[in-house]
Image (cartoon, rainbow, N blue to C red):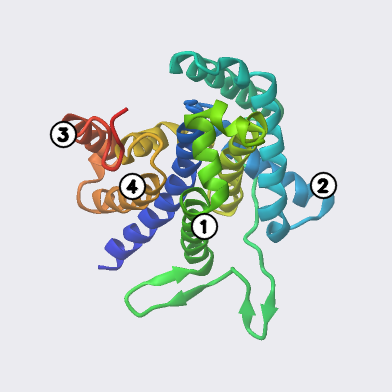
Amino acid sequence: MQALYAQLLVGLINGSFYALLSLGLAVIFGMLNIINFAHGALYMMGAFCAYFLLSLTGIGYWWALLIAPIVVGIFGMILERTMLQWLAGLDHLYGLLLTFGIALIVQGVFQNYFGSSGLPYAIPDYPQVGDWRGLQGGMNLGFMFLPVYRGWVVIFSLVVCIATWYLIEKTRLGANLRAATENPTLVRAFGINVPRMITLTYGLGVGLAALAGVLSAPINQVRPLMGADLIIVVFAVVVIGGMGSIMGSIITGFALGVIEGLTKYFYPEASNTVVFVLMVLVLLVKPTGLTGRAA
């Protein structure tokens, strides 16, 4: 049973990264209609940004959670203004090819300078209160041993996902964003700067990817190809949940992480393919995804 619980924990952790990354993809596709294949490279840049902050300036994990998404988000907004904005109204294939090329360039630059091996990033050991050692160590729950940092990743990811969903679906800002993508001419008539909103939305989406990279750094180390190993699975999560569906991406990300963990326990040989098998089955039954709507 301890092995089963351990795999469930691993599945929840993977599901946290799937949910955060697929959430960013869903925001970008739902608001901008762009299939952002550079998402994995931007996730990797978030991890490297945290690494540079620590190694070059001494700025630790807690500030990196704030600074890295802002830095990578600004980089994403520059990409949107200089390249992606010219693809508005064109077929999705153009955006896919452009962002795929951007991902290859970014990954190639980092791999050229840092190689393929991982760079260590320590789990933060503060704030300390008495015997409490921040996010280091673990807790004995009786039925399993829970590393504190991994529990923190699951809880923090869930909070960020719900907050993003609330921002997009329940606030006036989110309503303006959705309106700007559906009827930009009408929104401009109300004095709203639609291009700026689109740029900020892309920055938000890639900022979520960078945040996932910072969370991943102490667990998976910092590697130039860490995003390439994950992006295909994340795209499958987005397709299963429904392209552009915010809540669908969150629920599907966590659920598929748990299913993947259970598969590693009961039938390890299928753990690398179970997500894609589920994607095929869902598309056969409901081509728009579990929560997606037909165009």
Q: Residue furthest right?
A: 57
Q: Quadrant of the N terminus?
A: bottom left
Sequence order check, earlier mark of 1 and 3: 1
Residue pointed to by mark 4: 252
Q: Quadrant of the C terminus?
A: top left
Q: Is residue 117 visible?
A: no
Q: Using the numbered discs, state the Cα–Cα distance from disc 1 to disc 3 in whole angstroms.
A: 31 Å
Q: Residue at x 40, y 33 (%)?
A: 235
- Against 254, residue 230 (above or below) is above
Residue pointed to by mark 3: 285
Q: Quadrant of residue 246?
A: top left
Q: Using the numbered discs, state the Cα–Cα distance from disc 4 to disc 2 in whole angstroms.
A: 38 Å
Sequence order check, earlier mark of 4 and 1: 1
Q: Using the numbered discs, state the Cα–Cα distance from disc 1 to disc 2 in whole angstroms.
A: 32 Å
Q: Say what amino acid the circle numbered 2 marks.
A: Leu
Q: Say what amino acid the circle numbered 4 marks.
A: Thr
Camera-nearest label, 3 or 2? 3
Camera-nearest label, 1 or 2? 1
Residue pointed to by mark 1: 163
Q: Using the numbered discs, state the Cα–Cα distance from disc 4 to disc 3 in whole angstroms.
A: 16 Å
